Structures are given as C-alpha cells and as structure tokens.
Image (cartoon, rainbow, N blue to C red):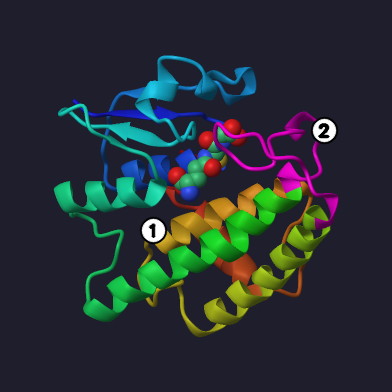
C-alpha cells in the first residue's frame, strides 16, 4: 500500500490531501513533524533527500517528492474524477495555472514568510542547504502576492474555475495558496469579488478541510 508523508499544518501536502478526498482515496498517512525538523532526520531524509513534504512512497519503494508528480501519479492510477482536466485544452490549462500558482503565489508567499520570520533564519529556502534571509525579498514577496490575487480575480471573472468550467488541481493549488497567504497576514480584499466567490465555493467542498 502506498504511503503519504505529510505535515498537517503545511500547505503543500494539503494539496495532496485535497486530491485524495476529491478522488475518494484513503491511504496511510505518516506525519513528518516540520516543527521538530524531522524532515532533516532519518528515516525521512533518506526517503526524500529534498527534505520536503509531501512525499508519496509507492509499493515498489519508489518515492515521488512533489505535489505535482504525486497528483499526476494518482490521476493515472485513479482517473476518476479527473483532477488534471479532460480535454486537451483543459489539461494544458491545468498545467499552466498550477505553474502560475506555484511561481507567482506559493513562491511569493514563501519568499515573504521565509525571509522575515526569526525561526527561519538560515532556512530561507527549503532543503538541506542553508540559505540566509534577504529581508528585501520579504517585501517583494508581499507585493507579488497582492498582485497575484488580482490576476486570479480577473481569471475567475471569466471562468467558474481556473482551467475553465470544471474544478481541478489548479483550483486546489490556488485555494491552498490563498490559505497560505494568511501566514503573511494577507488576504484578498473585498473588491476581489470573483476570487472571494470562488474561494467560498471551494471552501464548501468536503476536501477543503482535508
Ligand atoms: N513544490 C513542492 C514544495 C514542497 C515544500 O516546500 N514543502 C514544505 C512544506 S509546505 C516543506 O516541506 N518545508 C520543509 C522546510 O521548511 O524545511 C511541492 O509542492 O511538493
């Protein structure tokens, strides 16, 4: 049986937990306590030398170390309901929006968080190599998050969901990003009505609290 390495409080593994709920899958989950730096200790650091969660260990022993590769694998093995699009266009747009949410949403939030919080000194980038904080990046990250809220709002003015008319892993990623932005005390303001209506719709899904 495959096993998911998770940390309940962290955003990236929540993306995978939401996909599991959407697909009705129940697999063993093991917590890696990031607050105790367990990601840098054995046995986990040998399982995922990148020292991040989520990681999915397959029956073969093979390990997938990124929420995107894990989502792709789950989609191939358990295609229903589709989370990565159904038509050629939808599949392409899911990739495009996941990439944008990761680069413009998650990275910007992580930049703001990891370059400003005292406990993250020497940990400005995830992984086994130590990188020092650059305070200017925190400021820039906050500006980028606000800008990206606007991008999402514009997209959701045109479409019910990011890749079109169907809920997908791109919405999962964006929903978790909006939650994550609360860590740097930013949230979409009232004027972003399309983004807020979409957020309420996603929040009503059982997977939202995964
Ligand atoms: N793009 C990766 C990012 C994974 C990632 O950065 N995970 C964070 C938790 S959200 C982590 O493991 N951090 C470990 C650390 O801060 O040392 C994914 O989505 O799988």
Q: Position of residue 210 (x, y in %)?
A: 46, 38
Check disc 1 and report its element: helix, strand or loop.
Answer: helix
Residue 127 covered by magenta stretch: yes
Of residues 201 and 131, the one nearer the viewer is 131
Q: Residue at x 55, y 67 (%)?
A: 198
Q: Position of residue 204 (x, y in %)?
A: 50, 53
Q: Position of residue 175 (x, y in %)?
A: 54, 56
Q: What are the residue bounds of the magenta stretch?
A: 113-136
The answer, for residue 197, to whether it is visible in the render is yes
Left or right: where 120 falls relative to 16: right
Quarter where residue 16 is shown: top left
Magenta: main secondary structure: loop
Badge 2 vs badge 1, beta-carbon distance below 8 Å = no
Q: Which residue is mark 1?
A: 169
Badge number at residue 118: 2
Q: Position of residue 100 (x, y in %)?
A: 52, 68
Label 2 to label 1, Cα distance in Å? 33 Å
């Amino acid at each position: 049986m495959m096993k998911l390495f998770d940390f309940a409080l962290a955003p990236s593994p929540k993306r995978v937990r939401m996909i599991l709920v959407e697909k009705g899958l129940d697999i063993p989950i093991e917590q890696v306590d990031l607050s105790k730096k367990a990601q840098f200790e054995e046995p986990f650091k040998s399982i995922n030398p990148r020292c991040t969660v989520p990681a999915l260990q397959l029956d073969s022993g093979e390990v997938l170390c990124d929420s995107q590769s894990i989502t792709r694998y789950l989609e191939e093995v358990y295609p229903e309901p589709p989370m990565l699009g159904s038509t050629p266009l939808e599949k392409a747009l899911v990739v495009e929006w996941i990439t944008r949410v990761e680069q413009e949403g998650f990275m910007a939030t992580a930049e703001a968080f990891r370059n400003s919080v005292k406990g993250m000194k020497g940990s400005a980038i995830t992984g086994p190599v130590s990188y020092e904080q650059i305070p200017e990046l925190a400021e820039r990250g906050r500006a980028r998050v606000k800008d990206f809220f606007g991008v999402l709002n514009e997209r959701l003015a045109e479409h019910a969901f990011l890749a079109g008319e169907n809920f997908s892993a791109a919405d999962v990623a964006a929903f978790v990003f909006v939650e994550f932005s609360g860590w740097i005390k930013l949230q979409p303001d009232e004027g972003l009505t399309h983004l807020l209506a979409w957020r309420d719709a996603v929040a009503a899904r059982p997977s939202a609290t995964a």
